[in-house]
Amino acid sequence: METVAPYIEIIELIKEAGGEAFKLCYQCGKCDVVCPWNRVRDFSIRKIIKEASLGLSEIELEEIWRCTTCGTCPSQCPRGLGQIEVAVSLRKIATQYGVLPTPVRAVGTAAAGLRIDGNPLSEAREKRADWANGLSVRPFTEGMDVLYFVGCYYSYDPRLKKAAVATANILNQAGVDFGILGTQENCCGESIRKTGGEEVFRTLAKDNIKAFIDHGVKKVLVSSPHCYETFKNEYPEFMVNFEIVHISQYLLELINQGKLELSREYRKKVTYHDPCYLGRHNGIYDEPRDVLRKVPGLELVEMSECREASLCCGGGGGGIWMETPKEERFSNLRLEQAQAVGAEVLVTSCPYCITNFEESRLTLECEDVLEVKDITEVIQDVI
Ligand code: SF4
Ligand code: SF4
């Protein structure tokens, strides 16, 4: 481990790491008012920004790792400051110096898994396509309509694999000509980048881009909003542009084109949770709701905080890999909001949200009254 930089150097390092925007802050505190952390404990991004501007950042502290990059405070800041960029800049420095406080240690494990196996779960690369065993899923070849980029959690996690299977079943039912990259698929790299792992991100991105180009990929279908964000908004930094579509958008397209018939009823009260990287970061609010409204018998209700005001699940910005005490989990609050509107099913479309919500179902002991579903699992049930 390298020695922590003297504080005098921090301000220069922040600038180099891309966090110069902190200078714009005039300490109004609006960011802290809207930050979900202040529902569960004290946390001040304003203070972090102030310390960074003075070169007084304590990069060995847990505080710089808290921001889940939910995107709520940047939309409220009167100075248009990039709070997320400041947090990521500090993490870059901490990563560079190998300073990971105990609750954040698993970020290092995730980075190691990404370097060796191309996924943060340290699962074997050769098992990446095992979720599709027994299904009619082919390797992608040039000329196919769409590449289904499955993503790490949907490929390996037992809960999320069910959503990958549902997606494949839906695509087959709709007659979509699709394929997967299998062992040649790598993590998109979005979350490791937000923890400051720029080098790991760049390696993953280059490997994925090479695989896309080698296979003649033009259109990429993703299940995860994190893959969507990075392919659509970050990979163009490498001078490439692929057509990116999220499964919630694609489902609506297939239904509207008459390729997917929703013939069975789903007589349940459902609420939809907007994942941060689908909603706030990319403005995709209507398509998943339009899909759910087309399901016969389904009653869609909104939670008190929805669309732009959606409450973060806590999984972004590497939060999915960090230890968060049970009483500090935003996902518990979100489940309470779902129950408050009488929902029987909480539907979303993000692997981190589903992971956190499933865990909160156990914590809150509400498994019998509230289901958590990926949107594809609902659609699979009605075709
Ligand atoms: S809202 Fe913007 S200007 Fe106000 S304290 Fe936060 S970062 Fe600074
Ligand atoms: S982006 Fe979200 S989690 Fe991060 S400081 Fe802003 S409101 Fe808090």
Image (tube, rainbow, N blue to C red):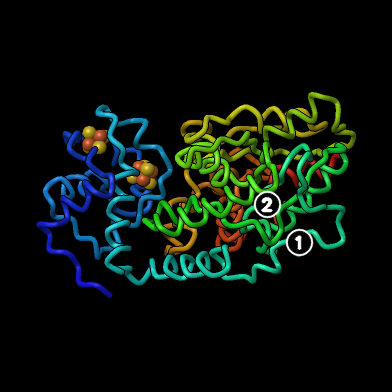
Which residue is pictured at 69% across the width and 51% down the height?
371
Which residue is pictured at 64% across the width and 40% down the height?
342
Extreme residue in the bottom direction: 1
Q: Mark 1 or mark 2: name the one nearer the start of the chain.
A: 1
- The residue wearing badge 2 is 150
Determine if residue 224 is in view: yes
In screen coordinates, is 52 left or right of 177? left
Determine if residue 370 is in view: no
- Between the C-alphas of marks 1 and 2, the distance is 10 Å
State the image coordinates of residue 324 (x, y, percent, origin top left). 43, 63
The answer to the question of whether label 1 and label 2 lie on touching residues, with beta carbons closer than 8 A, is yes
Q: Amino acid at mark 1?
A: Trp
Count of numbered badges drawn on the protein:
2
State the image coordinates of residue 194 (x, y, percent, origin top left). 41, 51
In screen coordinates, is 125 left or right of 141? left
Q: Amino acid at mark 2?
A: Val
Classify mark 1: residues with Cα within 10 Å, few (<14), some (14-19) or many (20+).
Answer: some
State the image coordinates of residue 108 (x, y, percent, origin top left). 42, 68
- The residue wearing badge 1 is 131
